[in-house]
Image (spheres, rainbow, N blue to C red):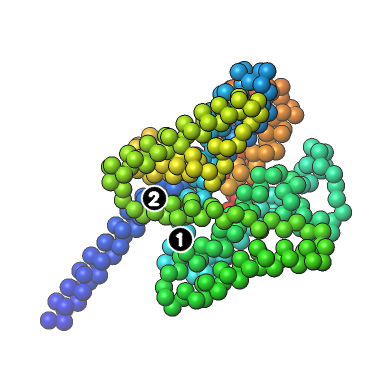
Amino acid sequence: MNILNKKKENILISNINKEIFQINITENKKIDYISFAKILASFSVVILHTNGKFWHFDYNIYKKYWISANIIECIFYFAVPIFVLCIGATLLNFNERYGIIKYYKKRIVKVIIPLLGWTFLLYFYKVYFIKNLNKGKITFEFIWNLYYGHKVYGIFGSLHSFLLIYMIIPLLAYVEKSKKIKIYAYCFTGLLLCQAFFPYIITVFHLNLIWIYNINVGYLIYIFAGHIIHYYTFSKIKKIIIYCLGIFGLLIHIFGTQILTLKYKKIILFHKGYLNLPCILYSCSLFLFIKENSNLIFKFIHRKFIIKIGSLTIGPFFIHPPIIELSFKYFKIDGYSFIYRLFGGIIISIICFIITFFIKKIPIINYLVP
């Protein structure tokens, strides 16, 4: 009887292990589309910057470049929202996989260290190589303001905005009653320090320090949306409605911006902004579309290749600004050219991914692209 019972136990354990294995495979496949979403967002960031002539509106010659620039700008405007949606899809249940200490260790490695490293690396690049930034005396105040003042490249400011979101996520992830007081107290303290205490101290004592954390936490809308889209199964009717709203948001963004800009002969931002309705509708619907059609994507592009490239997406964010500068310095590039504004961004993105791939192979330096 004991032998039979042991056999039954072994069979049961084996079946349970198989079920767990199948669940893990399913979950991994479900996560894979996020890698593709990050790749798409990474390309979009670069294209938005090679399409920078959108912001140089000239009414006298706008037909030659600005209409196409506006369309490119609006179509690829989802870059930052998609990254935040991915955060919502992957981090709101982090406590099911590891604790809060490990959570912050990961954020330090994946965000703070690369941001610090690239800030100083690119500072020396701009001072000594490009020579378009004045050298400063290395003091605590200088280092602080270099990091928080976005003096190297202004686009790094978006990562600083994410840091406050990362602080709030534990409040959203831990929903057990026994932990509510602790998490609420943590978030209250963090917001109190960031939104009130430090700005107050800096003002009262007339400290010459830049403080940027009195920012809008509206990005939480994408955090919530990313989690819902990732875990909720939408009916066909709901998906159609969401896709229609997304198309509506994109069209409003394109034509609303064009009509108002041509009317007032300067760029009007009424329909723009990551927290504006058109962008929210468009970005969320696109994220859902990527999730629902990821299997079609993987039929054309191997899943492992997508995952591998998806692990490199932080590199292009930091690397593409100097490459854009160098391309103008050493090549005769027409910034108004449609070919450069669209396909130049794609080529520069590919170069950035290749550079990131090799940086990852170098010990210690690979901390720049975790």
Could you tell me the amino acid type at mark 1? Answer: Leu
Query: Dot 1 lies on which element?
Result: loop
> Which is more toward the observer, 277 or 230?
277
Q: Residue furthest right?
A: 137
Residue in the image at 51% along x and 34% along y:
253
Quarter the N terminus occupies: bottom left
Label placed on residue 318:
none
In the image, residue 111 sits, relative to residue 316, either above or below, namely below
Report the side of 312 relative to 234 (left or right).
right
Q: Residue furthest front?
A: 263
Query: Dot 2 lies on which element?
Result: helix
Q: What residue sits right under mark 2 in the picture? A: 229
Residue 183 in the image: state x and y as whole percent: 51, 72
Distance (Cα) linking label 1 and label 2: 12 Å
* Neighbours of disc 2 within 10 Å: few (<14), some (14-19), many (20+): many
Residue 100 in the image: state x and y as whole percent: 52, 69
User: Does the rendering let one see residue 346?
Assistant: no
Q: Residue furthest left?
A: 1
Residue in the image at 28% along x and 46% along y:
235
Report the side of 112 relative to 300 (left or right).
right
Could you tell me the amino acid type at mark 2? Answer: Ile
Residue 338 in the image: state x and y as whole percent: 59, 22
* Neighbours of disc 1 within 10 Å: few (<14), some (14-19), many (20+): some
> Which is more toward the observer, 237 or 312?
237
User: Do the residues under discs 1 and 2 have CB atoms within 8 angstroms?
Assistant: no
Label placed on residue 92:
1
In the image, residue 191 sits, relative to residue 116, either above or below, namely below
Residue in the image at 20% along x and 69% along y:
11
Residue in the image at 31% along x and 48% along y:
234
Report the side of 129 relative to 189 (left or right).
right
User: Does the rendering let one see residue 90?
Assistant: yes
Residue 261 in the image: state x and y as whole percent: 61, 28
